[in-house]
Amino acid sequence: MSGILIRVLHIDDHQKWRSSVLHYLNQDGCFQVTSSVSGKDSLKILQHCPFDVIISDYQMPEMDGIEVFKYIRSQGNTTPFILFTESKSENIQKQFLESGGNFYIMKSGDPDLLFSEICQNIRQVVSLHQTREALIRHRQNEVSFSHI
């Protein structure tokens, strides 16, 4: 991943959080952030642009973060997904992680530590996803060559 920006789609209906995520991730220098104001808006963006990771708030009008996540997965999109929320609910966290979500991060604590954790989690989940995708492609190529 060195030298290549990680493409991040950030979904949050609150301007304060969109600005904070944009500021901290841009400060890191390894991320290219696209912000979205709603789940529905993000689905339109995803039709035209691929991303390496999606970070979403949970509590939003029209579609909550888990609904966005489940819709994206139902479309066959396996992009890593991080729920970044103020909603402290073990039920929401459990539902998200059991549905295949990658990380559940609370919007609390020291901002420098919080965004350091987010950056680390993004790198980890994107690297793992890229490795899995490469392995799948490799296995598909092996099958193709075995029929020759």
Image (spheres, helix red, strand yellow):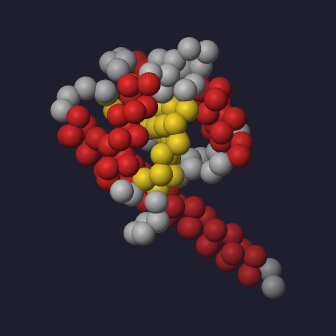
Task: Tell me which corner region of the image, top left, top right, bottom left or bottom right, holds residue 61.
Answer: top right
Quarter of the figure that contains the C terminus:
bottom right
- Residue found 43% across the figure and 53% down from its top: 31
Quarter of the figure that contains the N terminus:
bottom left
Task: Tell me which corner region of the image, top left, top right, bottom left or bottom right, holds residue 110.
Answer: top left
Residue 98 visible, this angle:
no
**Which one is nearer the viewer's eye here, 93 or 34?**
34
The answer to whether 66 appears left or right of 122 in the picture is right
Residue 30 location, x and y as percent?
39, 57
Residue 82 location, x and y as percent?
44, 38
The answer to whether 58 appears left or right of 49 in the picture is left
The answer to whether 126 appears left or right of 88 in the picture is right
- Residue found 31% across the figure and 27% down from its top: 107
- From this viewpoint, which residue is outermost toward the top? 61
Residue 80 location, x and y as percent?
50, 46
**Which one is nearer the viewer's eye here, 13 or 72?**
13
Q: Give the answer, above or below, for where 22 lies relative to 62.
A: below
Residue 129 visible, this angle:
yes
Residue 103 location, x and y as percent?
39, 38
- Residue found 50% across the figure and 22% down from its top: 13
**Which one is nearer the viewer's eye here, 11 or 144?**
11
The answer to whether 72 appears left or right of 65 in the picture is right
- From this viewpoint, which residue is outermost toward the right? 148
